[in-house]
Image (cartoon, helix red, strand yellow):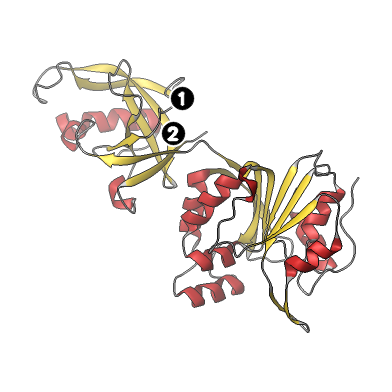
Amino acid sequence: MASAPSGSLSDYQTTTRMVKKLTAVPLPEDFMGESVLDIGCESGWWCKLASDRGAGRVVGVDRGREVKGRGWVDLIAECRARRWPRCEFVAANVGREWPTLGGHPFDHVLCMSVYHHIWANCRSHREVWAWFHRVTGGVLWWEGPTGMEDPVAKACAAITGEPYLRAPLERAADTYFARQVIGPAGHAATREVWVCSPQQILTGVVINGAGGATAAFQYQGGRRIKEIAALLGMEPYPGSLNVQLTEDFPWGNPPVVGMVSDVIYRGRGLAVPWAPREAWFYPVRIEGYRAYAFRFAGEKYSPRFVELIAPERLRDLLSGETAVVRRAG
């Protein structure tokens, strides 16, 4: 079994602290030639660990900072001087810079106790997670604070003038990743460990026109709402948000299929005969909010057009006319 690096590398990456962190983060014992990115590598403790465990390529990213008892230190220069096998180091102030790092996603990305500082640099959870999604090809290992109860996150929030809150953090993460909460961080009760897998992301624009208008959901005493609620266990807001995607939505193999009332004759209003039609439902995330893509079987709409239903009026929750959608598992 591979062991953790020994010896303290800085005032921050002390042996005691890092062993506690490692105990809480279920990293693989063997990286088997895979690529590893350490965001906020500090003095390189995680990078050396990955190298010792057989990683084929390790990249650490950070910037200089004030180190207790030493003043300002160029952390990247010190890491490079150690010449650990298969390790390279890149100077970047992530959150103000978004390095491409060769353009190839990494098998493992580590973000340990640095997320709140990145957020403070750009003040956008979504922007951070969008970059994480670009650089992650396999697994993102995330450890950090989830709210203002963490003193360092609170200090970051004081600098920005904006609160650091769990809800927008989770929505941004869930827009781009499938996320599993592992548990508390070993070194701080105010921090958690997540394991995140990147998901297929579809982008588009909100449009008006075709789709389930409010009147269709409310017609006949909310008949359609009741039928959908029986299928999904969720009562939809009356109406749907229509989004035109830049690529096809994966419509095959609908997770939920059921009969939902619809007009028999399209284009003649609602005061015409209605009949049950087979409907397909796909759980999705839009900007991190839970929703369903809804389509009747045999529909002639473009595969890039989606109607989205949710318990809330989705348009009120979005920050603009663009939308980020991913099909949830």
Along the polypeptide, which appears first: circle 1 or circle 2? 1
Q: Kindly state the secondary structure of the residue where label 2 is placed.
A: strand
| Residue depicted at x 36% and y 39% | 204
Q: Residues within 10 Å of mark 1 (few under 14, many from 20)?
A: few
- Occupied quadrant, residue 243: top left
Q: Residue 153, percent across and down?
A: 57, 70
The N terminus lies in which quarter of the figure? top right
| Residue depicted at x 52% and y 33% | 329
Q: Is residue 14 left or right of residue 230?
A: right
Amino acid at the residue labelled 1: Pro
Answer above or below: position of 153 versus 231: below
| Residue depicted at x 47% and y 54% | 126
Q: Is residue 246 left or right of residue 102?
A: left
Q: Is residue 323 left or right of residue 110?
A: left
Note whether residue 246 is visible.
yes
Amino acid at the residue labelled 2: Pro
Looking at the image, which is closer to me, 95 or 140? 95
Q: Residue 71, percent across and down?
A: 73, 83
Answer above or below: position of 276 versus 180: above
Looking at the image, which is closer to me, 274 or 154? 154
Q: Residue 25, percent across and down?
A: 73, 52
Residue, disc 2: 283
**Disc marking residue 255:** 1
Marks 1 and 2 sit apart, C-alpha to C-alpha, by 8 Å
State if disc 2 and disc 1 touch (CB < 8 Å): yes
Q: Kindly state the secondary structure of the residue where label 1 is placed.
A: loop
| Residue depicted at x 31% and y 52% | 320
